[in-house]
Structure formats: structure tokens, C-alpha cells
Amino acid sequence: MDTWSQVAGRQAGVVSYRQLRELAVGRALVRHKLASGRWVRRTDAVVTTTTGPLSEEQRRWVAVLHCGPGAMLGGLTALAVRGLRGWPREDVTVIVENADSFDPVEGVRTFRTRRPLDSLRGDDDLPCCRVEPAALLWAGHEPHPRSAMGLLAAVVQQQLTSPERLAAWVEALRPLRRAPMIRDLLHDLAGGSQSLGEVDVVRMCRAAGLRPPNRQTRRVDRSGRVRFTDCEWELDDGRTLVLEVDGGFHLEVVHYEEDVRRHRSLTTPDRIVVRCTTQELRREPWVVTNDLRALGVPRLDAA
């Protein structure tokens, strides 16, 4: 049988009162550890065997253990554990079966599901939802559809999963909110899009009667560095038109300068590089399509 110190060692120094009882740790010892300042009470269900501010890992353990057996990290918290970048959230999200079985804790957001939790859980010491259900359940309940679809594009772009695996989980999680919208997005991602901006370009072209672009084409710039372009068209005159889609992060100074250098290094006498923003694609797509027509992008029905 493990000792409390072994359990705490596996859990970043976090232990629940329930675990201590199961390990036959008496109340007197717990009171002594707390009174002496060696342990710290973090919630009415959890203590830490360390003092001082909680680390990010400890915050996650506190949240899961407070919510009781079966609870696991979910949503953006689970995806951050799995390696997702660029979607930070302060609160820790925990998937539970019954949110009424414990008291609320500041900084912990619970998501209740009736689905079998074991089917969602990965094989981790820290109970954590798998990438696909974590992303899909978050996308199904996120108030803003644009953010929901952006998250799914991000987990594919960052190679945490694939459109095919997500599509399989859409069926496994039935009924799933926004399932038709999600299936449409996964179809476009499977076709080569690596971002929501690229998906927007494909859909914009279809709506405007323009030939959809090739996506993520491998190129070598003048310095010999391998680059992948967002969208490309082979024009009737033999030239290539490249459209790069700038998201919000591209406007940061470091990213902006890198993008300018990248686009310049990809431009040749036979390859034109132009840019648009995701805001344009959403708010003024007709402006972008008019420019693409003027630059020679063929119609969808062109031979």
C-alpha cells in the first residue's frame, strides 16, 4: 500500500482528504501538519504538502481532486496539457458527472456531462480528457461559433490530432452541438486547410464562383528555407498567385516583420505574393474576391 508521501509525490504535492482517509492517515496527523505549517489547506477537500503559491500543475491537481473521483481536466485546460499553444485561460476546467456533489472553488470551472467519463479519459497520472473529446465538447458549448471553429483548426494545425480522428469522435459523441458545422469544417481541414483563415478563403471562392486554391504548398525561399504557403493558384498566363492570410497575431511587430521578410523572399518574377486579413475575409469578402479576379484567378467552371 502506498504511503501519503508517495501519493503526494505523484500528484505534485497535492492530496485529497478522501485519499488520506483511504491511506489510513489519522485526523490528528493532518491537523498537526496543518497547524505546524508543513501542509496547507487549499480547499475543503484538498491539502498540499508544500507551502507557497501553487504551480500551474498543482492548480490542476487541486481542481481535479476537489471535484472528486472520476473528475478530469477538460476543455482548454486539457488541451493545454496536451500541448495546445495560443489559447490561454486562467480558470481550470474540470469535467464532472455531478457538479452538485462538491462546493464551488474560485478559479475552477466545471463542465457537466452524462457521457461515460472513462471513455473520455486519457492514460495519464493527472486525470485529463483526450484531445478529441476535449476540443469537440468545448467547441460545441463555446458561445461564439467563430472561436469554436478556430479551436478545432488550431488542434489540427498544431498536429495534436487529425481531421479524421475528430470526425470519428463527432460520431462517438452524438448528440453533439454544432455537429453539422463541425463536419463541414473538418471536411475543409481534411482538404488541406491548416487554419480557419484558409477555410474562409476556400468557402469565399466557392461562393464567388472562383477556383479554390491549393493549400499549404511547399516552397523554398531565396535563403533555402522551406516555407508552406497558405493559398496558391496557377494562373492562365503561367504565373503563380500566392495569398497569405494574416490573423491577429500577425500584427505584432515581431510577427509582422517576419511575415514581410517571408513574403518578399517567396516573390519571384513568376510568383506574386499578396496578403489579406481574416477580418477582410469575414467582413468584406467581396473586396478580396474582386482583387483575386483582377489578378487572374480562374473561375470555378474554367477548364
Image: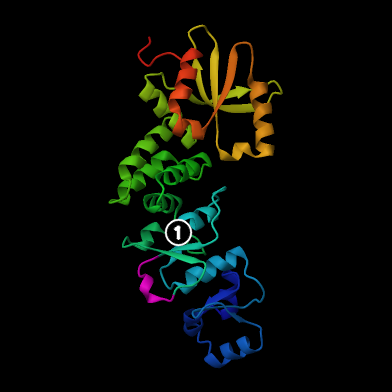
Residue 91 point in image, percent of width and height:
52, 62
Would residue 166 be visible to someone looking at this image?
yes
Q: Is residue 52 left or right of residue 281?
A: right
Residue visible at 56% across and 77% down in the picture? 42
Residue visible at 56% across and 67% down in the picture? 59
Q: Is residue 76 left or right of residue 37?
A: left
Front residue of this view, candidates 256 and 64 = 256
Q: Amino acid at mark 1?
A: Gly
Residue range highlighted in magenta: 96-103
Front residue of this view, candidates 29 and 276 = 276
Note whether 121 is above or below 152 in the view shown: below
Is 100 in the magenta? yes
Residue visible at 62% across and 78% down in the picture? 49
Note whether 46 is above or below 64 in the view shown: below
Q: Is residue 233 left or right of residue 100?
A: right
* Mark 1, residue position: 74
Front residue of this view, candidates 209 and 95 = 209
Is 137 in the magenta? no
Q: Is residue 180 left or right of residue 210?
A: left
